[in-house]
Amino acid sequence: MNQEIQPKDQTIVLIHHAKNHPWTELQMAHEPLTHAKNKEFKEKYLSSCFDETYNLSNSEIKEWWNLRIELYSLYSHEDENCVKRIKGLWYLLTESDLEEIRNKKWTEFGFQQADPTTDFRGGGVQSLDDIINFVSDYKDSLVKQMCKPQNDFYFAASSINVTFFMKRYFHLQEQLDERDRKEIADRVALKNFCIFLVKEDNFWKKLHQLLLSDLFNEWMALKQRRPETTIMDYGPVLERVKQKTKRTFSIRLFGNIKQLIEFYQSL
């Protein structure tokens, strides 16, 4: 998930540095507890009667834990690399240098306040990286459309919402337990996700970009059908994207990412 940004003559390489984390090697040798405890009756008691179970393979466990550690990083003004990320994003968006982090112009790109870092509390550093990746790939197309005032689409906030949903749904958020069962991926869905972590390069990035693009398309379709649409209608649109994601990952195991995307887009 590293990203290079080139303001003027200087290259800023944005890299996730290894952070201390609370998990032991023994914990990381096993699939997440939320997945292990999430078996339905059929798999829990009748698994010997069926060929397919949704236990994670060793390589899938490894990739899931690698991702969880990477997502563990929180934004901090004291972290020089975090500050470089913010400055790099600003340059991508404005092609100018950022003198102070606090700037009212951030709100034009869908941040809630003049200080954009307050928006990263839920999604951590990854929510910033996801915005950087999206802007890097779609600056002159989708991002321009998403940031037009008349479209009433809060680009940055929407991207962060997608990141937060993905973290929670795929069991990557902190302090999940059995009480969250209705909100997290079932066994099929998490198995699907982990399969693609292993065999598809940059799968997190590709999935985030798929969901954010679809969120914007759903929003614009609603505004076209109902010109009186306001930000108060945003919640149901975001919920529709979440439900499409859940249905896609839960329906069956897909052989490749093309099949997964085609199913998602058919909903």
Image: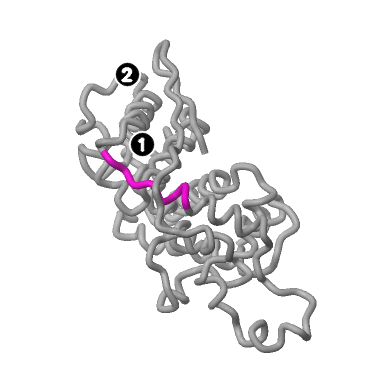
**Residue 237 appears anywhere in the view:** no
C-alpha gap between disc 1 and disc 2: 20 Å
Quadrant of the image occupied by residue 132: top left
Residue type at mark 1 is: Lys
The percent position of residue 111, horizontal first and vertical second, equals: 29, 42
| Magenta stretch: dominant secondary structure | loop
Residue ID at (54%, 44%): 205
Would you call the spot at circle 1 few (<14 residues within 10 Å), some (14-19), or many (20 or more)?
some
Residue type at mark 2 is: Ser
The image's mark for residue 96 is 2
The percent position of residue 125, horizontal first and vertical second, equals: 38, 43
The percent position of residue 215, horizontal first and vertical second, equals: 47, 52
Picture layout, residue 239 above or below residue 50: above
For residue 73: magenta? yes
For residue 99: magenta? no
Residue ID at (50%, 34%): 2
Q: Considering the image in quadrants, where does the C terminus appear?
A: bottom right
Report the residue marked by disc 1: 148
- Element type where label 2 sits in the image: loop
Q: Which stretch did the figure color magenta?
A: 69-76
**In front here: 257 or 236?**
257
**Residue 71 appears anywhere in the view:** yes
Picture layout, residue 238 above or below residue 84: below
